Amino acid sequence: MRKRLEILGFISAKQLTEIAVSSSPRVVTHERTNHPMNIIPNLVIVAKLTGFTVAFLAIGCDSNPASTRPVVKPISPIADKSPDFVFTPEDFFREVDANRTAAAKKYKGKVIQLTGVLHKILKSATHKVILDLQVPDHPDHIFDIQCYTTDQEPWTTAVPLQIVTIKGRFPDEVVTPELEDCVILNVTGEIQTVLAIQELAKAYAADPKGVMERYYDTCLIVSGVVASKVEEEGVVGDVHVAFETGSNMKFIADFLKFQQEADRLQVGEAARIIGRFRGDKFSGVGVLEMSGFIYAGPGK
């Protein structure tokens, strides 16, 4: 129950959504070196929308490589265990959602393997990282399948909406369909480019409608220099983080204060963040907003 309260406290703020992708599969190891989140080229953003490909914007991105020293990822307690059951996300969700008690008796402690679309990446109030595996047949559910991962930086391995194969342990207590001690086994799909905030602001100035149609309500990884931080009063308030845009345009990312992700953002320093792009939907022309969720490391 404590876990559910953590999730509910977080999810009420806003949710990440999707970036459509497709490519060839790759096997994930427990180390990372020059992942594209660390070495980002300048390239043309290509959007794959409903079966056809549309070249959209040329966005300048961070090209400074991070350290090439391998970073060993945490090892899941089930890393060396073979799956007891293999499901599609739809079948797993349907069975657990239909009868949680029966599912708990049948699968408690078992290793479950799933392959599906990584819908979003979340963090609980106690900083547990959650990979949300999409269930297409249940679009109205607040939660899809919540996969708690031992890796605290899974976005260096997979990003929405790549196809991932995940295995995890069925929990002792079931409130919603979920897995614990999860590890990513395989990833299919192109990795989303980190967007430079200044270039995104320039693109919006040139074509506001086009940028909103392309990016609104999607999960983005963006990079820029922090211009200011303003905290609302109270424990549950937001932290409004403004980034430099090189113009009169404003770009503001809102973080939940109790998540403490904004604590890692310092004025005058470059950073990468993951969040949902809202653009000018609620703020009006000239102000771009983003629901920030995760600090993803230093950036440019």
Image (cartoon, rainbow, N blue to C red):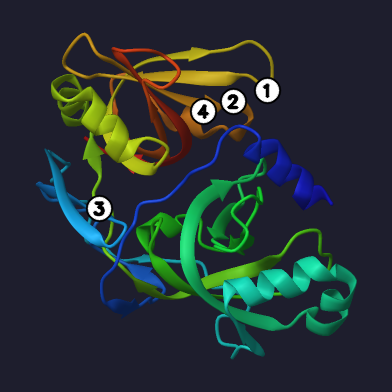
Q: Amino acid at mark 3?
A: Asn
Mark 4 crowd level (few <14, some 14–19, many ≥20, 10 Å Cα): many
Residue under pointer 4: 255
- Work out whether mark 3 precedes mark 4 in sequence or the reverse, and give the earlier one: 3
Element assignment for label 4: strand
Residue under pointer 2: 257
* Residue at (84, 75) in percent of width and height: 104
Q: CA distance from mark 2 to mark 1?
A: 6 Å
Mark 3 crowd level (few <14, some 14–19, many ≥20, 10 Å Cα): many
The correct choice, above or below, for 250 with respect to 72 in the image is above
Element assignment for label 2: helix
Q: CA distance from mark 1 to mark 4?
A: 10 Å
The correct choice, above or below, for 35 with respect to 293 in the image is below
- Work out whether mark 1 precedes mark 4 in sequence or the reverse, and give the earlier one: 1
Mark 2 crowd level (few <14, some 14–19, many ≥20, 10 Å Cα): many
- Residue 271 x/y as whole percent: 31, 34
The reply to whether dot 4 and dot 2 touch (C-beta < 8 Å) is yes
Out of 93 and 224, give the one closest to the viewer.
93
Mark 1 crowd level (few <14, some 14–19, many ≥20, 10 Å Cα): few
Element assignment for label 1: loop
Residue under pointer 1: 236
